[in-house]
Image (spheres, rainbow, N blue to C red):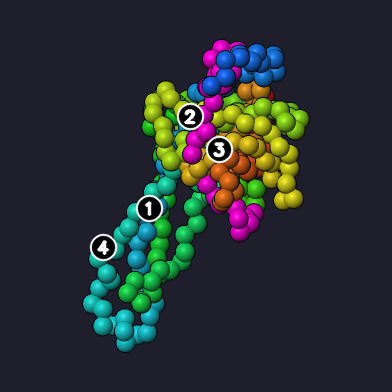
Amino acid sequence: MRQEDISVLGVVTRVILGCCLIALGVSNIVLLNDQQNRDGTHLPRESFVLLRVSTTISLKECLGPKKKCKALVELPSPRDAKITHQGSGLIISNSVEASYILTAAHVCKNKMPDQIAIDDMSYSISTKRSVEIFDFHGNHHDASVLHADDIHDVCILRSDGVWGTPVRVAKEMPAQGEQVFNLAAPYGVYAPNMVLTFQGYYSGTDFFNNEIFTIPTRPGSSGSPIFNSKGELISVIHSSHRNFENIAIGCQLQNLKEIIDSYVSRKHVVR
């Protein structure tokens, strides 16, 4: 679901030292209470993954007027083009032989047109997609799409081998105003054993049943997880506001639970 002023997928930093928030230019030190004293060290970083999706587009045949098409001895060269985009994700479960990754549907299933135009001539095309995943430690894994929910913009992928650390899924959403955290790779900013950590607040549910958080988001943030103060998964980012980058829009917790229960064996999911 999209609005005209919503964009599918900037960084705001706060300086936090221990349990104290230091405000530049202010001599007083403000002590945080127990609930606020969550600095992100409790987050399941080894669950984070960077996704790189490559789509190869191949020209198939000319769709213009027959006379004009016949004049073309062969299709324009090169006949193939490759488009690559990146997104964020997380390990949601391990089985005895595979790992399961959660991300946004538009990350794992980038929609392509059936035809394109070159020099005023239309051509039918075929596409081939491949998904590469880089885990928290920088190891490379191949993956395939298990299921993509376009309505709620959630996707589950399967990768051979047991790797990564599955996250725990929260039983319920936090109260409005509670602090939340995000692990993401906006603009593909990522390195082995390093993932950007953001914090913000849960604001509630909008008219379209999206969850709203005050967390900065940019391209590449799509598919990244939102955690509560216990480090439990509560949402996955799929959109941001076009003119206000400090708003993250994610799917509902119930949507995550439904796709996990439907497409990943219940006994393998870490609760």
Q: Earlier in the sequence, mark 2 or mark 3?
A: 2
Q: Nearer the viewer, residue 88 or 5?
A: 5
Q: Which residue is mark 4?
A: 78
Q: Earlier in the sequence, mark 1 or mark 2?
A: 1
Mark 4 or mark 3, whichever is nearer to me: 3
Percent of width and height locating residue 222: 53, 42
Mark 1 or mark 2, whichever is nearer to me: 2
Q: Which mark is residue 216?
A: 3
The amino acid type found where label 1 is placed reads Ile
Mark 4 or mark 2, whichever is nearer to me: 2
Q: CA distance from mark 2 to mark 3?
A: 11 Å
Numbered range of the magenta stretch: 1-24
Q: Which residue is mark 1?
A: 83
Asked if residue 212 is positioned above or below residue 178 in the image, the reply reads: below
Q: CA distance from mark 4 to mark 2?
A: 38 Å
Q: Nearer the viewer, residue 58 or 44?
A: 44
Percent of width and height locating residue 65: 37, 84
Percent of width and height locating residue 166: 57, 25
Mark 3 or mark 1, whichever is nearer to me: 3
Q: CA distance from mark 1 to mark 2?
A: 25 Å
